[in-house]
Amino acid sequence: VNYYKKEIEVMKRDFEKEKREMEQECQLEVSMLEDQKTDLEALYSKSQEVILGLQEQLQDMTRSPEPTQAGLPHCCAQALCNLGQRLEEEMHLRHQNQLQQIRIEFQRLSEENFFLKSDLERIQLELEAAEGRNEAQRKEIEVLKRDKEKASFELDELSTQTQKYKNELSQLSCRILQLVGDTSVHQAQKEKNHIAIQLLMERLETARCREEQQGDKIQKLEVELKHVNEECQHLQLSESELTESLEESRDQLHSVHLRLDATQSQHGQIIQHLREQMSQLQHLLSLKEEEARWQLDAQQ
């Protein structure tokens, strides 16, 4: 655009310079023709004066008493008259030729002026078209930049969401490990109680053999056995609850794993899509810049 503006300024200056030079040449030629016309008019006036003087002398001689010499002045007057007419015709012809040359030169200058104006208008139109194309390309580049920024923002949001899911997965893993530890403790307590029950059963069996002598002891052992059974039932309920909680946590962990896998897959697809878009945008930007440079080079 700046190049075309400079070219237009240079063409304007050259056009003005040529116009001034042509005007000066025309004025100079007109001045020369006017001088020639003035000289010819002066010569014509002198010729007319000479002719009038000769005609007067001829009239005087015709009125003189010497008829023998009347023919010579008449011939001289006729010759001078013919000479004046030829001078007048020649002056008129030269004047017409010079006017014709001036008209031809003026026509040529007018045509050159018209062509220069046409070239100037054409270059101005090309400049306006180039400015319009540059403005459209600038707007397209702005839109592409905004799309690129939007894609980067979405990529950052997806990264944040993925990190959040990873944190939740880590917390659930810690919770599962804790539940597994609690289950192991309850399992050990259950085994311990089971051993105690077996021992009590053995003791009960032994006590039954001595039921008659040790009734109070058997009753006491039965009460203790009842308490132990209640504790075992309580432990079994606790184990069942822990097992259900463990299963629920495992289900949640599996669900989170599935969500994480889906999110990672979606995240990978979105990242791939965004990368493809960014690659397309960069390729499109490169094409637009290359097209703009090519158009500018072509215009230059």
Image (cartoon, grey):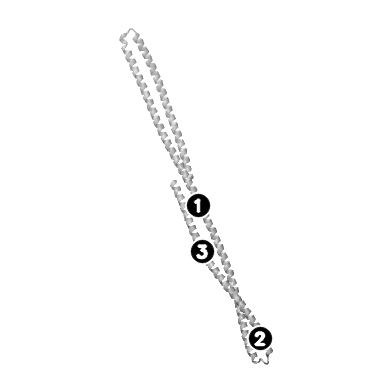
Q: Position of residue 69 (x, y in %)?
A: 31, 10
Of the numbered discs 1 and 3, the one sitting upstream in the chain is: 1
| Residue 199, placed above or below residue 1 | below
Is disc 1 in contact with disc 3, using a CB cutoff of under 8 Å?
no
Viewer-proximal residue among 56 and 5: 5
Q: Position of residue 167 (x, y in %)?
A: 58, 67
Viewer-proximal residue among 188 and 218: 218
Q: Are there few (<14), some (14-19), or many (20+) residues within 10 Å of tag 3?
A: few
Of the numbered discs 3 and 2, the one sitting upstream in the chain is: 2
Residue at mark 1: 141
Q: Using the numbered discs, state the Cα–Cα distance from disc 1 to disc 2 in whole angstroms.
A: 90 Å
Residue 37 horizontal side relative to residue 169, left or right: left
Residue at mark 3: 266
Q: Residue at x 37, y 24 (%)?
A: 92
Is disc 1 in contact with disc 2, using a CB cutoff of under 8 Å?
no
Q: Nearer the viewer, mark 1 or mark 2?
A: 2
Q: Position of residue 103 (x, y in %)?
A: 40, 30
Residue at mark 2: 222
Q: Can residue 185 be spotted in the picture?
A: no
User: Does dot 2 land on a helix, a strand or a loop?
Assistant: helix
